[in-house]
Image (cartoon, rainbow, N blue to C red):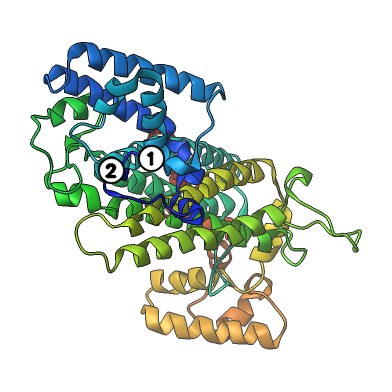
Amino acid sequence: MKLWGGRFTKATDSFTDHFHSSISFDKRMYIEDITGSIAHAQMLGKQGIISNEDSILITETLKNILEDIKEGKIEFDEKAEDIHMNIETILISRIGDIGKKLHTGRSRNDQVALDIRMYIKKEIKEIKALIKELLNVINKTAENNTNIIMPGCTHLQNAQPITFAHHILAYGEMFKRDCQRLNDTYRRVNIMPLGSGALAATTYPLDRQMVCDTLDFESITLNSMDGVSDRDFVIETISSLSIIMMHLSRFCEEIVLWSNQQFAFIELDDSYSTGSSIMPQKKNPDMAELIRGKTGRVYGSLVAMLTVMKGLPLAYNKDMQEDKEGLFDAIDTVKMCLPVFTKMIDTMTIKPENMYKAANNGFINATDAADWLVKNGMPFRDAHAVIGRLVLYCIENSKTLEELTIEEYKNISPKFNESIFDAINLENCVNSRKVDGGPSKEYIQKLIKINKDYINQL
């Protein structure tokens, strides 16, 4: 007989048991379930809802069960449906009727809400630690490459000169925001729902704040119906993970491009590349491509969870059992991708000469030439037109701005003099952009220090 089976006269069909069961995936929350149950049992004893002796026996037995699970001595039963009922069934099998008192004053509805929140809290901390490692690698790579000039692009077309350090530190900003989003998500996860009951709390004099403090939550939920039916925190967690994957995917796209022979800006380490089964010359950026591909499955988990929740009336509905598999998969995917990506970046070889060569194409110093005219008294819009004509002349004559003579410059505008060549020098173009947020070596060194301080505080 199931623990809830008193009202029923027939057993559930065996296929229904399988369909209904979630133990195959929610068993990973056994630590959270037992930890939450211990806090609940201790509170019941302190409040006199059960005797202190029963509270101690339940608590100690739950601790023993926890150790037995860790040591692989326990097999979960699909017929017990989920991790919550499995633990309670094992408890009752060991201490009899006293074990049946554990569920006093709570429902699986608030119990599962508690377990998921505890699980997410733990995982957010672990994911932040992985992002911290990635930020360290990005910052270290930038520090070692502050002088490497490369083309910065818009529309994937060469636009203005930057440094490799400036480029990858842009991704550092993205991953810093990911940490901030996880921190913000953690605040809304860190609210304790136990005591909400099935939906209308309970008549027992529970001390919810005691459980909240014992389990290291910031506060308790303020409405019992919301306490059991809220899955915003799950959606928000998967949303934050989706944005992390989006940032990884964008960076991977650049890695794929940069490792192509047409760019040859980098070469991936053999440990993070694969070959072809038919073409012996190939070195494929499969790790980057696979991370890019796995982004879709995390997005899928987010869309699935939004879809599950969009039509549910208050309070709890069985649909909510679908919250876990997508959440777990999204967490697992991010935790698998981050270390691979971090090591891939840390071990890649950067090719400065190819980046500099590419920066010499596409007239990426044209804006600096226009700015030189402005600084010499010409309105910017007129300067823009003059440099446009100058670029057209270069294209027609197969020259770069650096290759023109001063006479050719003066034929376009008498404003030009010899100092234009200093203005369009790529190193000067980069290092004269000293505005905070720009690519100059002076500012990049400042940003690297800012990042070190930020990382140390994570």
Residues 127 and 83: in front is: 83
Give how far across and how far down residue 211 sits, in percent: 20, 27
Mark yes or no: residue 449 visible: no
Give how far across and how far down residue 54 sits, in percent: 24, 15
Q: Is residue 73 above or below residue 170?
A: above
* Tag shown at residue 6: 2
Q: Amino acid at mark 2?
A: Gly
Q: Total marks drawn?
A: 2
Q: CA distance from mark 1 to mark 2?
A: 8 Å
Q: Is residue 269 above or below residue 390?
A: above
Quadrant of the drawing holding the C terminus:
top left
Q: Are marks 1 and 2 in contact (CB under 8 Å)?
A: yes
Give how far across and how far down residue 388 sits, in percent: 52, 84
Q: Which residue is mark 1?
A: 1
Q: Tell me the residue at 79%/53% (across/down).
A: 274
Which of the two labelled residues, at mark 1 and mark 2, occupies the earlier sequence position?
1
